[in-house]
Image: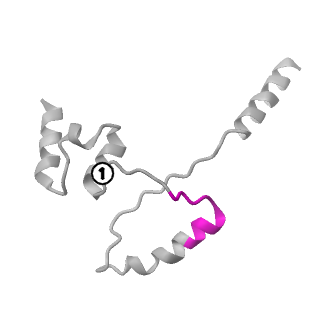
Amino acid sequence: MLSFTFGLATLAAAASRPNFIFIMTDDQDMHLGSLDYQPAVLKHFRDGGSWFAKHFCTVSICCPSRVSLLTGRAAHNTNVTDVKLVSLLFVLLSNLM
């Protein structure tokens, strides 16, 4: 009976945790036509969830922000500060040494 009660308490605690959905996208550009969908997608998220009027972005271009997110390190600490393959190769080679 004690284990059953503990199990119910664990389920109740797990159910009360907040849920987070992280969405990372790439290649929203005019050439692929993906900008046409953005207003509808933003409206869908805004109407059905939260809208953050104030936010923070450490790096505003794709490669450094992706590397920072995946490694947990700031872009200047990964040497990926631009959209160049050379910087990424340097990071990969330096990690092998």
Q: Nearer the viewer, residue 19 or 93?
A: 19
Vertical relation: 72 (above or below) 42: above
Dot 1 falls on a residue whose secondary structure is loop
Quadrant hosting residue 14: top right
Q: Quadrant of the N terminus?
A: top right
Quadrant hosting residue 9: top right
Q: Residue at x 53, y 77 (%)?
A: 40
Q: Is residue 52 left or right of residue 3?
A: left
Q: Is residue 40 left or right of residue 33?
A: right
Magenta highlight on residue 90: no
Q: Quadrant of the C terminus?
A: top left
Q: How many marks?
A: 1
Q: Residue furthest right?
A: 1
Vertical relation: 60 (above or below) 18: below
Q: Residue at x 14, y 48 (%)?
A: 87
Quadrant hosting residue 92: top left
Q: Which residue is mark 1?
A: 59
Q: Residue furthest top?
A: 2
Residue 50 image offset from top left, x and y in percent: 61, 58
Residue 11 image offset from top left, x and y in percent: 76, 34
Magenta extent: 43-53
Dot 1 alpha-carbon crowd within 10 angstroms: few under 14, some 14 to 19, many 20 or more: some
Residue 45 image offset from top left, x and y in percent: 58, 65
Q: Residue furthest front?
A: 54
Q: Residue at x 33, y 68 (%)?
A: 27
Q: Residue at x 80, y 23 (%)?
A: 6
Q: Is residue 62 left or right of residue 8?
A: left
Give the image's coloring scheme: one colour
Residue 65 image offset from top left, x and y in percent: 31, 51
Q: Nearer the viewer, residue 49 or 71?
A: 49
Amino acid bearing label 1: Val
